[in-house]
Structures are given as C-alpha cells and as structure tokens.
Amino acid sequence: MVSSLDGFIAKKDESVSWMRSTDHYEKGTTLTDEKIEEFLKSIDCYVMGSRTYERALELGWPYGEVPVIVLTHRDLPTKETVEFYSGDLEKLINDQLKPKYNSIWMVGGAMLTKDFMRLKLADDIIISIMPVVLGDGTLFFDYIGQEQGLHLKDVTAYKDGMVELWYEIKKKQT
Ligand SMILES: NC(=O)c1ccc[n+]([C@@H]2O[C@H](COP(=O)([O-])OP(=O)(O)OC[C@H]3O[C@@H](n4cnc5c(N)ncnc54)[C@H](OP(=O)(O)O)[C@@H]3O)[C@@H](O)[C@H]2O)c1
C-alpha cells in the first residue's frame, strides 16, 4: 500500500493527488512502465474491502482482467472479474484462494489490513512511502494490538522520492 511518512493511506476527503510526487531524488531508481507491468503480471488475484472497491470504481479500474475478490455485506455494482465474499477471512484465503492462486495481493484498505495482520494471513508487506506528511486521515496500521516480527527483504528508493519497504512477516516459532 501507499502511505504518507506519518502512516496515512487515505486523506479524509479521499483525494489522491498526494500519491503523485513532484519530489526529485537524484540517486533513486526510475519506476518504468515495463517494471510496473512485469510486477503486475506476477499477481494472480486481488482481495480488497468494499470501500477500496468503491473508490477503485470511481477512480478507474486498474486491475485489468485479473480476478478480484471484494469483501462486503452489501449489494454492490458488479464487474465480470469480480466476486463478492462475506464472512470468515481465514476460510477465504486458506481454503478457497491459496489452493487456486500462487500470488494473492491484498489491496487494502485499513480495515482489511488490520484483520489480515491479526489473523496472520499475510506473508509479506510492501509499503511505498511518499515524501509527504498528511497529518490526518486513515491510518495504515490502526492499532493492530499485537507485536509482529518482520524481516526486511528489500528497500528501493525511487527518483520521485518514494521509498518502497518490503518486509516478510515472521511466522511465530513453534
Ligand atoms: N494508499 C493505498 O495504497 C490504499 C490502498 C487501498 C485502499 N486505500 C484507501 O483506503 C480507504 C478504504 O479503506 P477502509 O479501511 O475505509 O475500508 P476497506 O478495508 O476498503 O473496506 C472495509 C469494508 O469491507 C467490508 N468487509 C471487511 N471485512 C469483511 C468480511 N470479513 N466480510 C464481509 N465484508 C467485509 C465491510 O464493508 P461492508 O459495509 O460493505 O460490509 C467493511 O466496512 C479508501 O479511501 C481507499 O482509497 C488506500
């Protein structure tokens, strides 16, 4: 997910211009369309909360023909590649999606992040920090209430000042 330095993933007014940086970091890497395309090709399935889905419908669908699972208790506008699910997240991920898909991308938002972390359903977290302090909005990590160890897998700084941190979530030792 994309975050401000102070940990917000959405502004109160839901505007997204803060996600487009005009900063310049000379030593950074350029994020090319080819790199984005290659990365997106590795995703087999997206999972998202209903509020993230509604926002994606408003902003323009970025998920192409890849299957998307939307969590909701409501009747929402449908799309050909979208399936709706309501209920137990462990059953959805472990029983339904993992046997079928290799790479499952949890898009967000904050509510779902919290549940995925608490239920230990996520393997990795990739957080892209934009060079901005928003001061208010929706927090990425909104009081998860548990300590979780992380292993830093990679760090990439981009020319526009965005810093991508890639962590693996350590599974509890048994
Ligand atoms: N910065 C980023 O990278 C990024 C990424 C993603 C999203 N966002 C932003 O985050 C905001 C949305 O985040 P959010 O935390 O408010 O909402 P969200 O996580 O997108 O959606 C939460 C909703 O999902 C449904 N839901 C969750 N778990 C469920 C379950 N087990 N069964 C059935 N339904 C379930 C419920 O909606 P119902 O009422 O429909 O049942 C719940 O209110 C938006 O502004 C979006 O643009 C930012």
Image (cartoon, rainbow, N blue to C red):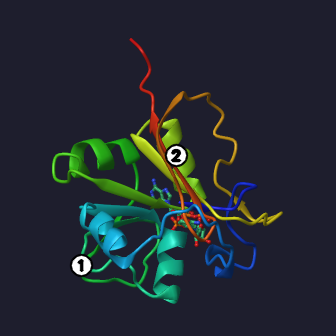
| Mark 2 or 1, nearer chain start | 1
Q: Position of residue 74 (x, y in %)?
A: 47, 72
Where residue 161 appears, as percent x and y from the top left, is 63, 65
The reply to whether dot 2 and dot 1 touch (C-beta < 8 Å) is no
Q: Is residue 135 left or right of residue 41?
A: right
What label sits on residue 14 in the rendered view? none
Image height of 172 relative to 48, above or below: above
Is 31 on the left-hand or right-hand side of 5? left
The C terminus: image quadrant = top left
| Amino acid on which the number 1 mark rests in the picture | Glu
Q: Position of residue 24 (x, y in %)?
A: 66, 72
Looking at the rendered structure, the secondary structure element under dot 2 is helix
Number of residues whose C-alpha sits closer than 10 Å to that of mark 1, classed few (under 14), some (14–19) or many (20 or more)? few
Identity of the residue drawn at 16% across and 46% down:
99
Query: What is the residue that sits farthest to the top in this orientation?
Result: 174
Q: Which residue corresponds to the image point at 31% horizontal and 68% vertical from the top-left?
A: 40
Q: Amino acid at mark 2?
A: Asp
SS at badge 1:
loop
State the residue in front, 64 or 83. 64
Instruction: Tell which of 38 and 29 is nearer to you.
Output: 29
In the displayed orientation, state which residue is furthest to the left. 100
Q: Is residue 20 above or below residue 138?
A: below
What's the residue at 69%, 73% (across, down)? 23
90 versus 108 height, above or below: above
Q: CA distance from mark 2 to mark 1?
A: 26 Å
Residue linked to disc 1: 65
Task: Confirm if mark 2 falls within 8 A of ligand 1.
Answer: yes
Where does residue 49 sit, x and y in percent of width and height?
A: 48, 64
- Residue drawn at point x = 39 percent, y = 47 percent: 89
Residue at which label 2 appears: 115
